[in-house]
Image (cartoon, grey):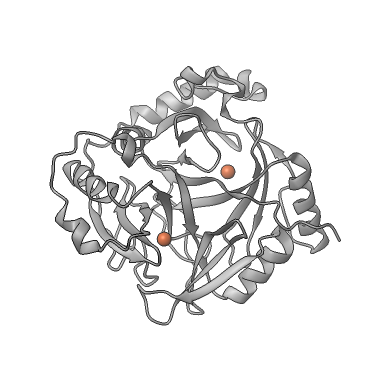
Amino acid sequence: MTNISGLVKGLHHISLVTSDQELNRRFYTEVLGLRRVKLTVNQDDPFHRHLFYADEKGTTGTAITFFEWPELPRGYVGLGSPHHLSYSVKGVDSLPKWASWLRANGVSVSGPFPRDDKLSLYLRDPDGVLVEITAKNPEGVTADYLKGLEGSEVKGVTEDMRLVKFDHASPLSSDSHVTHKFLEKLVGLESFSERANPDQEGTSLAEVGSPDNPGFLKYLTSPGARTGMVGKGNIHHIAVAVEEDEDQLKIKRSLDDAGIRNSGVVDRFWFKSLYFRDPDYNLLEVATKKPGYGVDEPPEKLGTSLVLPKWLEGSRGKIEAALRQTDLQGSGAWPPRYEPVPSPPESLHVRQNQLA
Ligand SMILES: [Fe+2]
Ligand SMILES: [Fe+2]
């Protein structure tokens, strides 16, 4: 049997569904301070956009991507439709600045909440996606102390506020033991720990990762978790990163040997992808770090114009016409009306977007 432990290094990207590319762009660039690093189309559905936002360089583990599917219904969180994603920032000092900046932009914010050795804020994006901003708290600063620092005028996302990389993604699991065994044996994720979820009695947080990067998958676990539905405002899939093509092939072999259905390796041009579902139907992807978003655009031009993989260039005229058609339906007003953050934020019984 091939040894696959330690091949997965952490998160690669997280992909979601948006209803409105213009509100989406303004929110992730102007409000959250990320950079659009790729403006392209969904390679499996080329008449719809695929938008990538990341740090300045498009570093692995920073990219949040969106399929623009305005015609999809609103989804809701549950098994197969992950709960939230979390970005890390450098220090807890930036959390009151984030809260002031987000509130100044009309975004609903909740927190900070103590999360083990961290403190976290929660917010909703224009489609209702739950986003956590978390910082390590080695000095044990209290949430109340940080709340007292809010209110000063913040004019933009300053260097100390920057979203550094993903901290974790949180899908749901109905059985942490099964999830753990699946990810350990078939994907090589050996690190596992579980504890009570402070936000909902009777549920737990199961952290899965690698020894040097534990807990980048933080499953919200309950035997009573219900099935969700991916739609607008939900996470579509979570991609984890491997260095080399052969690492990806080893994981494919391990899935094949266990009889787990998978996509086979798909060349996404900026990376190679392998898709499969975990035991609770969450869609996962193993993606290679190389070649990266700079393969077809110079660094200063990333994300500024519509790029298509070579095999779609022949259809560019038709694709651009379809995207213009989508845009004719119009964009929502800015700033959007942000939905409130569920309370408490990491509870399973609050089904995201259930009222939409
Ligand atoms: Fe979280
Ligand atoms: Fe992906």
Q: Quadrant of ligand 2?
A: top right
Identify the image quadrant of residue 270: top right
State the residue at coordinates (58%, 48%).
239
Instruction: Please determine whether, in this image, residue 279 is positioned above or below residue 286.
Output: below
Q: Is residue 197 above or below residue 315?
A: below
Tell me the residue at 57%/76% (across/down): 175
Q: Is residue 138 left or right of residue 106?
A: right
Residue 295 appears in view: yes
State whether residue 340 appears in this view: no
Choose between 356 and 203: the one closer to the eye: 203
Kindly indicate the quadrant of the structure image that contains residue 267. top right
* Farthest front residue in view: 139
Q: Decide: is 48 above or below 215.
A: above
| Location of residue 176 in the rendering, given as x and y in whole percent from the top left corner | 57, 74
The quarter of the picture where the N terminus appears is bottom right
- Does residue 294 appear left or right of residue 25 in this picture? right
> Which x, y percent locates residue 68?
44, 38
- Quadrant of res 326: top left
User: Across the whole image, how many numbered discs are drawn on residues?
Assistant: 0
Q: Position of residue 296 (x, y in %)?
A: 60, 20
Residue 122: image location, x then y, percent:
31, 56
Query: Which residue, as the protein is rendered here, is positioned at the far bottom?
Result: 202
Residue at 55% over, 19% down: 297
Q: Quadrant of the C terminus?
A: bottom left
